[in-house]
């Protein structure tokens, strides 16, 4: 196993930073997220640079730092977590689906975060997907 420095880049725009393949570089050139198929949301303060940083190293191993990975393939990761936690009998809905079906469901799981409703505010300075 290759040991990388702490906070080293593991993935940029979904690929290894040294991946020079056409697929990898096309996402870099487009500043596109491979998981949402939209522009990367990780930018500097004036939004002139899209970082594309998906995962980095940490003292505890490689770490995903961008929630967009959870949105890949129509939110399949979040759907699996919902099924594990609540079973398949409780419907999993995106925010727009919940708004549409709100009067016809008794209970459901609603995904909140980027591109679906809003992030959940925790305290005054923290928000999470």
Image: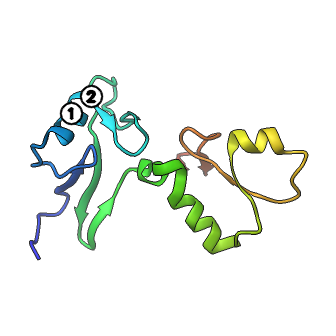
Q: Residue at x 90, y 45 (%)?
A: 103
Which of the numbered marks, if any, corresponds to residue 26? 1
Structural distance between the alpha carbons of marks 2 and 1: 6 Å
Residue where numbered disc 2 is placed: 30
Q: How is the image coloured?
A: rainbow
Q: Position of residue 29 (x, y in %)?
A: 20, 29
Q: Nearer the viewer, residue 32 or 49?
A: 32
The image shows residue 71, relative to residue 62, as above or below, that is: above
Residue 23: give x, y in percent of width and height.
Answer: 20, 40
Instruction: Specify the quadrant that holds the N terminus.
Output: bottom left
Secondary element at image label 1: helix
Residue 41 drawn at (x, y percent): 39, 35
Q: Secondary structure at mark 2?
A: helix
Say which of 41 and 82 sits in front.
Answer: 82
The residue that appears at 59% across and 60% down in the rendered structure is: 79
Tag 2–tag 1 contact (CB < 8 Å): yes
- x and y percentages locating residue 36 in the rendered image: 43, 41
Which residue shows up at 70% across the image and 38% down it? 96
Q: Residues within 10 Å of mark 1 (few under 14, many from 20)?
A: few
Give the total of numbered labels: 2
Q: Is residue 74 left or right of residue 69?
A: right
């Amino acid at each position: 196993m290759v040991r990388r420095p702490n906070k080293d880049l593991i993935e940029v725009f979904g690929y290894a930073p040294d991946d020079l393949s056409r697929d990898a570089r096309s996402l870099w050139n487009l500043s596109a997220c491979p998981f949402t198929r939209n522009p990367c949301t990780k930018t500097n303060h004036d939004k002139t640079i899209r970082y594309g940083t998906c995962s980095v190293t940490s003292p505890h191993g490689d770490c995903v730092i961008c929630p967009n990975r959870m949105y890949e393939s129509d939110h399949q990761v979040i759907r699996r977590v919902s099924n594990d936690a609540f079973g398949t009998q409780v419907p999993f809905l995106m925010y727009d689906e919940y708004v549409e079906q709100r009067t016809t469901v008794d209970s459901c799981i609603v995904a909140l975060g980027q591109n679906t409703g809003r992030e959940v505010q925790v305290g005054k300075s923290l928000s999470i997907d």
